[in-house]
Image: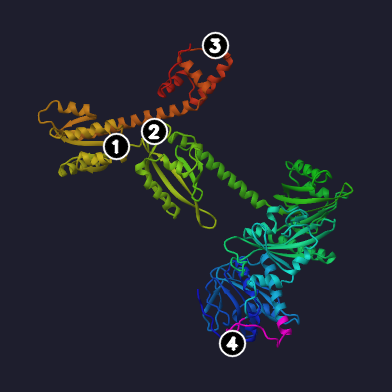
Amino acid sequence: MNVPAISLDAPPPHSPDLLAVGEIAAVPAMLDIICHATGVGFAAVVRVTEERWLACRVRDEASLGIRAGDVLRADTMPCRDAWQKGEPVIINDVGAGERAGTTSAGRPFGFRSYISFPIVTSDGAVFGTLCAIGVQPARLDSPDIAHIFRQFAALIGTHLDARRQSAGVDHPREKDGTAAPAQGGPLATLIEHLPVGAGLFGPDGQVLLVNPALRNLVRRTPPSSIPGEGPGWTGYAADGAILDPQRHPFPRALQGDIVSGARFLCRSDDGTEQWFRITGLPAPAGAVGDGLRIASAPAALLLVEAEHGSNGAEHALQRSEARLQAAVELVGLSPYGWDPATGALEWDARLKAMWGLPADAHVDQAVWLSAIHPEDRPRVEAAVTRCCDPAGDGVYKIDYRVIGIEDGVERWVSTHGRTQFENGRPIRFVGVALDITERKRDEAVSRARAERFRQFAEHSANVLWLANLKSRRLTYLSPAVRHVWGVPPERLTSIEDWLDTIHPDDRDSVERAVERVGSGDVVVLEYRILRPSDGIVRRIRDTFFPIRGEEGGIRHVGGIAADVTGRTGTRIYVVDRDAESRQKLLALLHPAGYEVQLFESPAALAEVAESLQPGCVILDLEAAEPDGLTVARALKVGRLALPVLVVGRSHGDVGFGVRAMKAGAVDYLEKPWQPSALLTAVSAALAELRTDNERSQARDDAKQRIGALSAREREVLEGLLAGGTNKSIGRALGLSPRTVEIHRAHVMETLGVRTLPEAVLMAAKAGVQPTDAL
């Protein structure tokens, strides 16, 4: 963006405000942490007055072009509101399509997100603000980010107080008027001057730096170098559950997360207990100097505060209540209470509405139970019994339906809570409830869609497939892959597995098609596969399409692959050296509805024969062209679906037609031929091709069905082919006639036949031989 700030009246190069902030050596580390935590790329400490917004210290990773000493009109930036009211200003997004802020010259500044916390000195005056600016929307209203801003703004205010009190004392400065860097770098200075316990720790737990406050706090704690880690430290989540060690501030900060104010109970060796709040921050790379510099290895900055007596407990309670209220308003939660002894309920208006009741309606345990759906009531009562059992954990968590008492509307409710016990008796239950009717409806719609897709996929002759572009895994293959590819879906688990089945000459074009789909294109492509089961070449017509995620990116692709091997259609390949003769054939065949492709020589056809779709070849030869018969012979030997119809002049050689037929031609016409005779011969050749394909498909289907039989079922089938009865087959296999009868029924079901002759015919197609053991 790089929009320069335009000054109202440029401040002098040694402005007291600039110098005051410049002498706080910890500010660069603060701004670095803020940029990392917010992700907006720009952070600054600014001096704010009624008219001016003065940038005193800046970190600009977003290339906004604002430098320390630049001045904007105060009314162009939300910081003035924070300065006037002494309260934070947080803007996640000024609005879709809008850009906010202008320079003092009226040029658009262009921010979309903004956060500003007032910097207040001890006399209550607001010096200015600590702010961050983003050119894109950002989630800035999280408690973790607010905690960082509040701590850092307070620290800056403390430093400004100290400077004011020591006015007149000389401060070491560099030639440009800024403060000389403190020993250890800005992050070390920040840690040293934080009003709470703070320390910097490496990935292996080594102590890089701790301040005096932290040393005092952990003086009596168990022997562990890292606060919160090791024996004696127990972390607790907001709901009171014990925190998983992997969710502790230290490991999460090493992973780049921010953890704010996690509560820990520390038990020392002498049995004393102390509550602490620990905040974990990822340390910015390169922020520590003089032997402590962090390179590529991560590090964690931990802030530790001790909770003292009732004040700490009350403060924690207030923050918990504030977070709970925010959650209630944000997602529509309804907190409620229940007295197990009296059955009395405490419900808010939102929860009563779920039961179809007005806000002033009386509720008790009987009212609650009366609206629960009859099919769900036993589950609910069982869940209540479990949560009231002192031997259990007291947790109550269940989703169920209610039927509105006054409006008759069916709703889904999700509720979660915990029972409190005293002397082995349940004395109090506290929980929350949420209306999840829309979610359940969406889930039902999704299930219905998934079921329709499953039924369609299972009964479709085409192969439906889905793949993850990042992992290169095939996430779905429909059952038709067994018939088309000849293998079960579990044999093809990755895109590479699938590419290995594609004909080598077609593999590059398929890989390029996948790349195009990953860029958003829809691609229709025909290619050949070599079936892994039998090596047979099949021709596939595949429609590749991108699947976009909610964020708009393409992570998955899908396809619909149809086996078009047997679709001879109406393709004709004309091979004729004479251009006039080629045009004559084209003029005859096109009006008859055939697709025609012309070749000037047999060699030209032979070069691309393996890639052609099934169809009829019209080969115009003269007796003096023996190479044409060589091509016809090669097409037959290659078992390509290209029957050859030979036309030509034999010049009195009565054996020419015979040689053409022996070479592999399906028919021969002497020139000049009659149009009706040629069309009849073409139609017959294509009909024979379709018949051959049907036989091939029937044979493939028979092999696939036979392959699905168990070893014992195949033995029974071989016995049936030999004419055996249930008894004779049973004697040969050591089975009872009843067991043979059961296997026989399974064989008939697997083969999809009803009678024994049908089973025998299918077995013959698949090449199954009768047993000689009878």
Measured as percent of width and height from the top left, residue 71 is found at: 58, 83
- The quadrant in which residue 612 appears is top left
Earlier in the chain: of badge 3 and badge 1, it is: 1
For mark 1, what is the residue? 615
Question: Residue at point 58% right, 15% down?
Answer: 738
* Dot 3 and dot 4 residues touching (CB under 8 Å): no
Measured as percent of width and height from the top left, residue 697 is found at: 39, 30
Taking 582 as reference, is 559 left or right?
A: right
* Dot 2 and dot 4 residues touching (CB under 8 Å): no
The magenta segment is 161-178
Query: Considering only vertical position in the picture, is 534 above or below 115?
Result: above
Measured as percent of width and height from the top left, residue 764 is found at: 41, 21
For mark 2, what is the residue? 535
Taking 183 as reference, is 508 left or right?
A: left
Earlier in the chain: of badge 1 and badge 2, it is: 2
Query: Considering only vertical position in the picture, is 733 above or below 532?
Result: above
Q: Name the amino acid type tagged 4.
A: Pro
| Helix, strand or loop under label 3 | helix
Earlier in the chain: of badge 2 and badge 4, it is: 4
For mark 3, what is the residue? 731
Question: Residue at point 59% right, 65% down?
Answer: 285
Taking 618 as reference, is 28 left or right?
A: right
Q: Name the amino acid type tagged 1.
A: Gly
Label for residue 11?
A: 4
Is residue 711 in view?
yes
Q: Name the amino acid type tagged 3.
A: Arg
| Helix, strand or loop under label 1 | loop
* Dot 3 and dot 1 residues touching (CB under 8 Å): no
